Image (cartoon, rainbow, N blue to C red):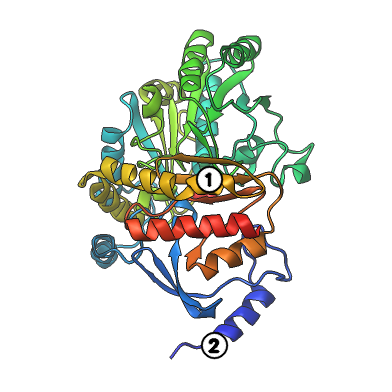
Amino acid sequence: MPEFTPAELRALDRAHVWHPYGPMPGRTDPLVVESASGVRLRLAEEVHGRRELVDGMSSWWSAVHGYNHPVLNEAATAQLGRMSHVMFGGLTHEPAVRLATRLVEITPEPLRHVFLCDSGSVSVEVAVKMCLQYWRSVGRPAKQRLLTWRGGYHGDTWQPMSVCDPEGGMHELWQGVLPRQLFADAPPAAYEESYAQGLRELVARHADELAAIIVEPVVQGAGGMRFHSPEYLRVLREACDEYGVLLVLDEIATGFGRTGTLFAAGHAGIAPDVMCLGKALTGGYLTMAATLCTARVAEGISRGKVPVLAHGPTFMGNPLASAVACASIDLLLGQDWQQEIKRLETGLRDGLAEAAALPGVRDVRVLGGIGVVQLDHEIDMAAATAAAVREGVWLRPFRDLVYTMPPYVTSDEDVDRICRAVRAAAAAG
Ligand code: PMP
């Protein structure tokens, strides 16, 4: 017997629990999830006639294999019996070593060293530290600013917030206290030489103070679900090489196949100096992220006055998460994952095409396992969410966007259902 009824849980939640970007005292009314299996969330009580919802969000884009997966369960259970955590300073273990080795194998060639941490935001903090520390270590301490383009999202801790879209989200709140970074305009969807030239000039003009360029490759996610030409990544790579700036690719959302290539850098055939991974790294099972860097960056840091990477919170290199991450990567690469993403892409394209004709719809776009309907107005989130739930689907619309990033294992029938829900949410919101 559960200790609390769903109504009691909701009341206690409102009294005590702070949700992401939620108010306190609680004025939101979250649905209570009892369990999850495959692509379905089971609710503790019926809502809008539904007890089960197909998860169109993959738990913020992470649960690519679905929930309660026997292979991932087995990896977690086996590791649990050995050790769930052990400090990583001065000690090491097979799951972390295996994971780091595997990540180096599957990411672009010059990436060689891996720092395993506990969230995407922290992996971006680590990436920024690596870059700033690198320049300090090689005698260029003035190189300490970051360049990014508008419309981005890199996490909610301090340095990542400084490179999030300055107009979006909570940025307003931190005016004047965040590090002041450099912003280019958000990249256009198609390649435009004049925009590329502007990027080159910005890098050239600020090369003396720039430590790194950090961007989300090909898809800007939480900042607006925008897609852009991979050609811009080549432009950034060339500018970084020409003017002596490090390139950080934040592949936290795009990594592990989401855009149709294993990493979005693959669309451009380039490699970054530093890469951040998270979300789908453990198939959404456990909290873990990774920052990878090249030998050049690592050796530069090691030559410095402080020859160590200055980062070491308690839960780094967690063995349980590492073991599940290894299993998740094997599961993904052990199947024809490209075919699966293509199947999702086709299903989303077919299913969302007719949303373009709905009143108030400005744009419909699909790439890999990402489907987006953009409206010409701010969405009524409660109405849009309720419309999706009525269709038996969990979505989380925001700003002017209704979008889906379903688990890769979503059946064609469930992709259809998700598309129906996206259309219903767009019409209702
Ligand atoms: N970078 C990108 C591109 C992301 O999409 C996110 C999460 N939405 C983050 C960083 C932050 O990751 P986390 O939420 O795990 O801290």
Percent position (x, y) of residue 100? 31, 40
Residue lying at the far bottom of the rendered structure? 1
Mark 1 or mark 2: name the one nearer the start of the chain. 2
Query: Does residue 242 appear left or right of residue 185 in this picture?
Result: left
Q: Residue at x 23, y 48 (%)?
A: 330
In the structure shown, which secondary structural element does the residue marked by tag 2 occupy?
loop
Which one is closest to the eye, mark 1 or mark 2?
Answer: 1
Looking at the image, which is closer to me, 133 or 422? 422
Q: Nearer the viewer, residue 331 or 85?
A: 331
**Contact between labelled residues 2 and 1, with CB atoms less than 8 Å apart:** no
352 versus 109 height, above or below: below
Task: List the single residue furthest toward the left.
Answer: 334
- The residue carrying mark 1 is 372
Q: For the C terminus, give its image quadrant.
A: bottom right
Amino acid at dot 1: Val
Residue drawn at point x = 61 percent, y = 16 percent: 195
Give neighbour class at mark 1: few <14, some 14-19, many 20+ (Cα, 10 Å): many
- Residue 407, image x, y percentages: 38, 54
- Quadrant where the N terminus sits is bottom left
Residue 79 horizontal/vertical position (percent):
26, 61
Left or right: 169, with 300 as reference point: right
Which residue is painted at 47% across and 55% down in the image?
419
Residue found 30% across the figure and 47% down from its top: 96
Mark on residue 23? none
**Is residue 79 something that shows in the picture?**
yes
Q: Amino acid at mark 2?
A: Thr
Quarter occupied by residue 213:
top right
Taking 380 as reference, is 34 above or below it?
Answer: below
Q: Secondary structure at mark 1?
A: strand
Residue assigned mark 2: 5
Residue 418, position as x, y percentages in the image: 45, 58
